[in-house]
Image (cartoon, coloured by chain):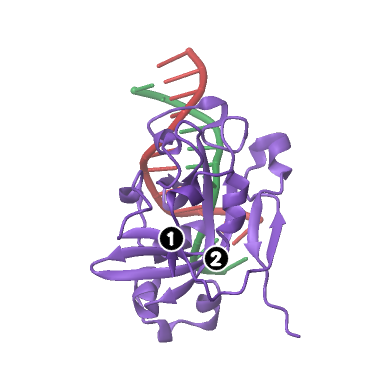
Chain colours: A purple, B green, C red
Amino acid sequence: MKKLTKDFYKRDTLTVAKELIGKYIVHRVKGENLVCRITETEAYTGIEDKACHAYQDRRTKRTEALYMEGGHAYVFLIYGMYECMNVVTEEENTPCAVLLRGCRPISPLDVLAQQRYQKTYQQLTNYQKKNFANGPGKLTKALAITREQNKKSLLSEEFFLFENDNDSPPVIGTGPRINIEYAQEYKQKPWRFFEMEKTKS
DNA sequence: CTTGCGATTCTA
DNA sequence: AGAATCGCAAGG
């Protein structure tokens, strides 16, 4: 297990988005480390990107976190009820980030299930297990991430990402980003990355 | 101050 | 396919 360092985050956003697939996110809540494996991400590449909150250098109270140095969290509220978690990338004053769109629960399963559904993991239906955190709002709910975590460093002991040396490299698919109808020519850019289902051989 | 809408989710 | 639901940012 190797914690991702500042150098990992302070690189090209598309590279970071792709490499975050198969990494793990940890959030320490009430003394317990909640862990999930990242399965889907989207890159938001800054002031040129019409889908990015910092498009045209839009620097507001909300987007302030995007301007921080790579390795911080940008958490915002969407549709009045769901939190979205982003990993800020690149240098300070380069407002880019990677949206964490989906993950698989790792441990402790019962605590994650409690956060998400107020049930033990065993009580979940197969449908709930399969769709446990396959969306940005679901991911933050399972990991208890809220705007409270906005602007927090991802290099701390309570909130960080890591990679597992023993994992085999994930098979990565790409495609256009979701729900950004307004982004015109940027809406078709293949800046979404996801782990492909393991095919049975 | 007002207003229009969004990097979504759940249910049917 | 539609509703829920409210903060945010733009405009007057």
Query: Which residue is pictured at 69% across the width and 42% down the height?
Result: A187
The circle on residue A114 is none
Disc 2 and disc 1 in contact, CB within 8 angstroms: no
Marked residue nearer the N-terminal end (2 or 1): 2
Q: Which residue is mark 1?
A: A161
Measured as percent of width and height from the top left, residue A125 is found at 50, 82
Measured as percent of width and height from the top left, residue A149 is found at 33, 50
Q: Which residue is mark 2?
A: A134
Query: Which residue is pictured at 36% across the width and 69% down the height?
Result: A34
Query: Which residue is pictured at 41% across the width and 66% down the height?
Result: A142
Residue type indicated by callout 1: Leu
Q: Residue furthest left?
A: A30
SS for dot 2: loop
Query: Which residue is pictured at 39% across the width and 64% down the height?
Result: A26
In the picture, the quarter occupied by the N terminus of chain A is bottom left
Chain containing the residue with disc 1: A
- Asked if badge 2 and badge 1 are on a common chain, one would say yes
